[in-house]
Amino acid sequence: MEKHNITTDASYVDDRTHVLNHRDTFGIMNRSGDILPLGKEIHGIYHKDTRFVNQLRLRLNQQLPVLLSSNIKEANEILSVDLTNPTHFLPDGRQIEQGSIHVHRSQLVRNGKFHEKIEVKNYLNETMPINLTLHFNGDFKDIFEIRGMQRDHRGSDLGHETIDDHTFVFSNKGLDGIIRKCKIAFTLPFSEFQTPGKVDFDLSLAPKELKCIEYSCHFIVDEADSIKESYWDSRSANANDLDRSNDYFPVINTSNEQFTHWINRSKADLVSLMADTPTGKYPYAGVPWYNTAFGRDGIITALQTLWVAPRLSRDVLLFLADQQATTLDESIDAEPGKILHEIRGGEMVSMDELPFKKYYGTVDATPLFVMLAGEYYKRTGDLKTIKRIWNQIEKALDWIDRYGDIDQDGYVEYQAKSKNGLTNQGWKDSHDSIFHANGQLAEGSIALCEVQGYVYSAKRHGAMLSKLFGQNERSSELETDAIRLKEQFNRDFWDDTLNSYVLALDGNKNPCRVKSSNAGQVLFTGIADQEKADKLVKTLLGSDMFSGWGLRTLSSDEIRYNPMSYHNGSVWPHDVALVADGMGKYGYQEQALQLLTGLFDASLFINLQRLPELFCGFGKRSGEGPTAYPVACSPQAWSVAAVYLLLKSILQINIDHSQKEICFFKPVLPEYLKRIVIKNMELDGQKVTIEVIRHDKNNMVGVNWNFDNPNWKLKIIK
């Protein structure tokens, strides 16, 4: 394995885990609310790419409590756990029967903090002595180390220190010289603190009496302690954050309760990943591996939700414009005009063991940035925002021609320059994801098929935006470039034998004659000729590509196909959604509906109806759900946002601010979805409610709307 083709081999997804996340902090606990060093030790509470807590154990009278129930609340902000006591004998010989003492744990995270409220109630008719013990520890491991990277040296454990009878600290000094601390403060004094990290509370509970213990873990980096907040302070603040983030999205209800729950679950998950930045909200990519800002992921998430949540697209554009590369720096694959790949914290980044502190090794984020800008303007008419980032848009367009097209052949290619960077720099960035039909890995500067589509779209949107600033000559030039690229692409990338676009061209311009979902994403950008799109849709829905749940990333006929691999045969919901919307754009709404139905069916088998980053590509088996990919991120922004684009793919709703028009192009609804109501969607500074109805008699779809603005019109193309 190459040094920085980083694997994610630490399994954590099973029915014993729950995830809480807020901005730069997340926790992975078992169903009892404990954190245990089990398996490959992924459980923990993490802050800024460092695991501060790797053990949290609650014991009742020195015994493991019995789990009654465990749930993440619907808004995704609190883990609620109900426990009871096992049968226990007191020193005086009395027996406490199982089910006599109730323990309720409420846990939440807030940026830089973890809070827990523990309520203990005695349901016996006599006073009971109860000993409650909590044991904490932290290893301060960098998340990349947990993901499997080996390190020759680590920082120094500074041990535990008692501050007072309410508070103690454990800390670590990293190789970067930064001291990272976990300070744990209780609302009640602990009865005993003899073993490092272990606190005892001796409680005497009268009949039916309830007592409460609250504590907060503060994650401190280099003495920069965050504002002190209690459990209730943080719970209230999180609720306010949720209200503000929820306001980005309309309320969507359907005639199918399970489908509505899928939408609501996806919305809650996406909101939980939306971090505050100086330029607004930004959707972090996913928990646990990618709980930070990624350029590609953020843009695609914005594109998926643009039609319903345009403010998120604005915030994403502003953030990425601020982070755009301005200099040439091969150590981080940066070039002037290039859009960010990812931002990281943690000790390993600080020590330059990894180049990801601010890393630009992505070939597609830059054209996608321009594409999003154009789509955003078309949706909103927000010229103010476009003016604010116009300089960055121009630089991104310049990057495409000056740096993206390495050999000046008209295609945008990538070739890693950073010795520690990613080898493959498209969305399939595994080291073995780009190869020829014989399985040989592609070498040299690689031109991916879907990237050419993104460039085509960027050129067209750049042409449209240039006119806004009176740059008519530049607009004409970009439009000509787009036309030329489309013609060239359909000649060089199409393969009649595959009835598909090839995966890529290698450094010698030899085609990688491999059937993959990358070709499907070509449809999303509109670069495909119609006759080739007609053939490609049939190819994509063949049994080798369509698993029944969704599209495989790689045909099962290919030599490197493995349904359990990360990129060579698995199913990625965001990928499926992009292809589905592309099918709809070419008039294949019924085929897009097949993909939507596959993922909806999959969601019914998945915990919380939360589509993960990916799942295995095995074929659909009757009465069974999809096979989980053990280390998939969940929640993952572009996976949970997929439902919005899937809906758009079958409705083909197009909102054009310049024409003051909402157009539905050959909309379809499945039998299980008779009605959709989109309430309070942002439109031209107002709110609109749209109702889509499936008429059973002729399977036609009707649309009603409630919008008090005579300048706008509703159009339906059947």
Image (cartoon, rainbow, N blue to C red):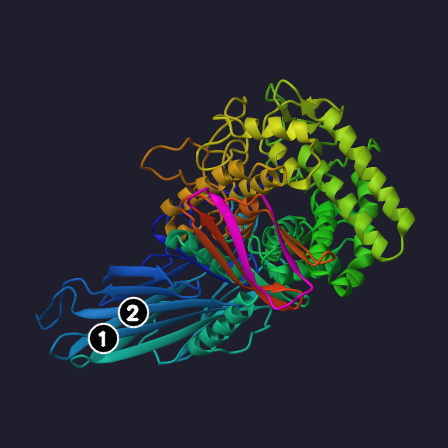
Q: Is residue 78 above or below residue 513?
A: below
Residue 393 place in picture, x, y as percent: 79, 53
Q: Quadrant of the N terminus?
A: top right
The residue singled out by tag 2 in the image is: 104
Helix, strand or loop at mark 2: strand
What residue is at 70 percent from the left and 47 percent from the top?
368
Q: Is residue 716 magenta?
A: yes
Q: Is residue 518 above or below residue 195?
A: above
Q: Camera-side residue: 282 or 222? A: 282
Q: CB of mark 2 within 8 Å of CB of mark 1?
A: yes
Q: Which residues are magenta?
A: 696-718
Residue 352 place in picture, x, y as percent: 67, 51
Residue 91 place in picture, x, y as percent: 12, 71
Q: Is residue 707 magenta?
A: yes
The residue singled out by tag 1 in the image is: 121
Q: Residues within 10 Å of mark 1 (few under 14, many from 20)?
A: many
